[in-house]
Image (tube, grey):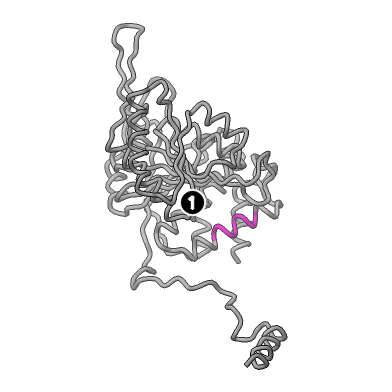
Amino acid sequence: MARRSASILSRLLANPSSPLTAPSRSITYMPRPGDGAPRTVTLIPGDGIGPLVTGAVEQVMEAMHAPVHFERYEVRGNMRKVPEEVIESVKRNKVCLKGGLATPVGGGVSSLNMQLRKELDIFASLVNCINVPGLVTRHENVDIVVIRENTEGEYSGLEHEVVPGVVESLKVITKFCSERIARYAFEYAYLNNRKKVTAVHKANIMKLADGLFLESCREVAKNYSGITYNEIIVDNCCMQLVAKPEQFDVMVTPNLYGNLIANTAAGIAGGTGVMPGGNVGAEHAIFEQGASAGNVGNDKIVEQKKANPVALLLSSAMMLRHLRFPTFADRLETAVKQVIQEGKCRTKDLGGDCTTQEVVDAVIAALE
């Protein structure tokens, strides 16, 4: 028997293509009947660079023959409210791809982004801040997922002038929303084989509001014994992020802190132009550039048509996985990362001088 086993082994080593060797392809994805049916996705190009980068996604999806059909609506950040037909479209399609919507600073209309999140109860924002192969950054081994509560906190929009010159802005924290975002963060960590969840807070000062958030996180953490749970004060968190970002894994935060941390972590990992993200609730999901900084761009970038489409292309790969089209998602992500790693075609924010269209053409060529 030993001589026979040795003989088989010698034949395998001499002929690597033997059927007894491990297959070159990973275990196949088995779709459910009907999973290949095309899905309709609501598309909001948005303001500034939005039409450029959403147009890039449309081109790449068409080149891939992805089973996605876009239902386009023109929405601008200076509108007083999101048109009802747009809300109905997202409710019907369940999924939306969105460019940046500009929000006036100071006076003016309220944020349409917040209107969408509240109207559709899209309570969780997720931004994946990770080193991209080929991009040189100050820190290595950065792979942080920032999960942020999307519907309350300082973004509740409850402000009023008490007397002339005195404005009161209410920060609302509820046990329901805090437990909900904590459960999502731990569930995400569990399903993605993540090892640690860090709650970010300022409970040393806001003892009731952030104290309630922490209390909720601690209660949820008891149900996930295999995941390490810790807490960090937000100002120390910012310092630790820029000094040793690789120590963080999944971070769960109230609304405002999450926005600041996600943009900081994105800048550390390679820039907001390459960080994907999305927003999800029980029924609906909106995918967009992960970090909000630069998602509208400026007039010069728009005129020169040199917006970086990478972040939204990677967010689209997240969307394809959400729609249960994993092979298309893998192809898209691989092609985008190949283009970045080769370094021949990059926009200005990544050290190059390419146009949006040149990056799109390079990604399509990589797909082929």
Quarter of the rendering occupied by the N terminus: bottom right
Q: Is residue 333 magenta?
A: yes
**Residue 144 image position (x, y, % from top left):** 53, 44
**Residue 261 image position (x, y, % from top left):** 50, 34
Disc 1 packing (10 Å; few <14; some 14–19; many ≥20): some
User: Does the image show residue 12?
Assistant: yes
Q: Considering only vertical position in the picture, is 88 above or below 326?
A: above
Three-letter amino acid code of the residue under disc 1? Arg
Q: Disc 1 designates what residue?
A: 194
Q: Nearer the viewer, residue 259 or 346?
A: 259
Q: How many marks?
A: 1
Of all residues, the one furthest to the front in this rendering is 2
Tell me what residue is drawn at x 35 percent, y 33 percent. Answer: 213
Q: Secondary structure at mark 1?
A: loop
Task: Specify the principal SS of the magenta part.
Answer: helix
> Left or right of 241: which side holds 68?
left
Q: Nearer the viewer, residue 58 or 270?
A: 270
Residue bounds of the magenta highlight: 332-339
- Could you say which quadrant of the image residue 177 lies in? top left
Q: Nearer the viewer, residue 337 or 42?
A: 337
> Left or right of 271: which side holds 30?
left
Q: Considering only vertical position in the picture, is 10 above or below 360?
A: below
User: Does the image show residue 52?
Assistant: no
**Residue 52 image position (x, y, % from top left):** 53, 45
Quarter of the rendering occupied by the C terminus: bottom right
Tell me what residue is drawn at x 59 percent, y 78 percent. Answer: 22
- Could you say which quadrant of the image residue 24 lies in? bottom right
Q: Is residue 321 magenta?
A: no
Q: Nearer the viewer, residue 25 or 250?
A: 250
Tell me what residue is drawn at x 34 percent, y 43 percent. Answer: 220
